[in-house]
Amino acid sequence: MKRYLPFVIVAVAALATLGSGAILYRAKRPQVLSIPENEVLGKSDTESAHIRGNPNAPVTLEEYGDFQCPPCGMFAAFAGQLEKEYDSRLRVVFRNFPLSGHAHAREAAIAAEAAGLQGHFWEMHDVLYREQEVWSKAPNVRELFESYAGTIGLDLDKFRKDMDGEQAKARVDADRKRGESLGIQTTPTLFINNQPVDQKDRNPEGIHAEINAALEKKRQT
Amino acid sequence: MTVSRFRTIILIVAAIVSLAGLADATYLSVQALTGETLGCGGSPDCFRVLGSSYARVGGIPVALFGVLAYFSVFTFATFAAFGYMRARLFLILTVGAMFLATLWFLYVQAFLLHAYCRYCLFSAATTFLLAGLIIALPPVHERSVS
């Protein structure tokens, strides 16, 4: 019996590794996403999208993001580099997808939308990501968001009113609902020219390659 | 405690330590295969490390090689604990190769990417521990099962 014991132990370890790996893979496996034709940016929902860059750019990078998600913060910095690199050939679109597991994500999204009602969505977007580590741990985020609003020159009374009002909340909820209808579960989820960026390509090299491919495709058509 | 017993204990500890490394490498492999390089347990630095070109060799995530390496260490340590002489030699060679690979990955993180992935650091610590155990492994003088 002792002769076979090491084989049994190794076989059990192999099965346990394969089994746990398969379970983990199934749990994390991305769903196939695609933006339906009737929901393509610029056809039915342009008014709620926040766009940065050349509005007529041949390539659109659309992000569903959560302001409290650290990878989204990292991606925001990377998106800034992409905007500079591709200049007029790229426009970036941001949509809110606050995850329920992040305590302050929804309030941050509302703060960004409230700033957007004064035409300063992207300024608040940048501040929220830059200061993410600070406000994510703060007990009273509202105070911090108001200080950010002051920093970027917003009308504070209007900002406070909009934070409590329905318009900013409705925009956050609309984005979230749209994301859910697309089957989005994690952030950041990215689309390039309405096509989902494959999970394996969600890294700097992959995103560059996808944008370049989209540019090439546009050039040929 | 006899030398033989001490050797067996070290090999059992090495097998257990390799299981920790195996779990870490399996998690990283699943992350890479599902494309969750941006997620990475909430650490933005992982994006830079696991999303870099150094995280893949010929399109294959290096974490998968890690799974293979840790599983090999577990297998060789188990067989060596049961007295298989050749397994002991393979164990030493595998841990030696992993040690060198770990030094390279630490260099990449420290000097090329300027970012550390905590899962990779855990793997490095595991490999260093395995290397320490191998160094502490007493040489074999008597004949065993081969």
Image (cartoon, coloured by chain):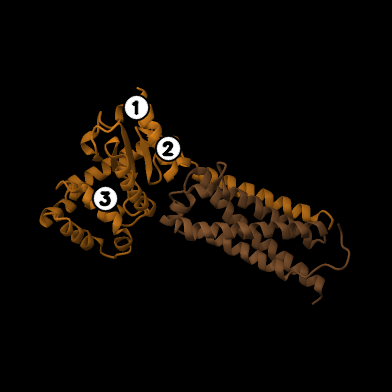
Return the residue at label 1. Answer: A218
Number of marks drawn: 3
The percent coordinates of residue B18 (x first, y second) are 65, 59
Return the residue at label 3. Answer: A109
Residue A35 falls in image quadrant: top left
Q: If you read the primary sequence from the N terminus, does the residue marked by circle 3 or circle 2 appear first?
A: 3
Q: Is residue B80 above or below residue A185?
A: below
Mark 1 to mark 3 CA distance (whole Å): 33 Å
Q: Is residue A144 left or right of residue B22?
A: left
Amino acid carrying mark 2 in the image? Ala
Per the image, label 2 sits on a secondary structure element best described as helix
- Colour in which the image shows chain B: brown
* Residue visible at 61% across and 60% down in the picture: B20
Return the residue at label 2. Answer: A209
| Callout 3 and callout 2 share a chain | yes
Which residue is farthest right? B143
* Chain corresponding to orange in the figure: A
Q: Is residue A179 above or below residue A66?
A: above
Q: If you read the primary sequence from the N terminus, does the residue marked by circle 1 or circle 3 appear first?
A: 3
Q: Is residue A162 left or right of residue A173?
A: left
* Residue visible at 29% across and 43% down in the picture: A94
Per the image, label 1 sits on a secondary structure element best described as helix
- Of the pair A217 and B65, the residue shown nearer to us: A217
Q: Chain of mark 2?
A: A
Badge 3 local density, few (<14 within 10 Å), some, or many (20+)? many
The percent coordinates of residue A42 (x first, y second) are 25, 30
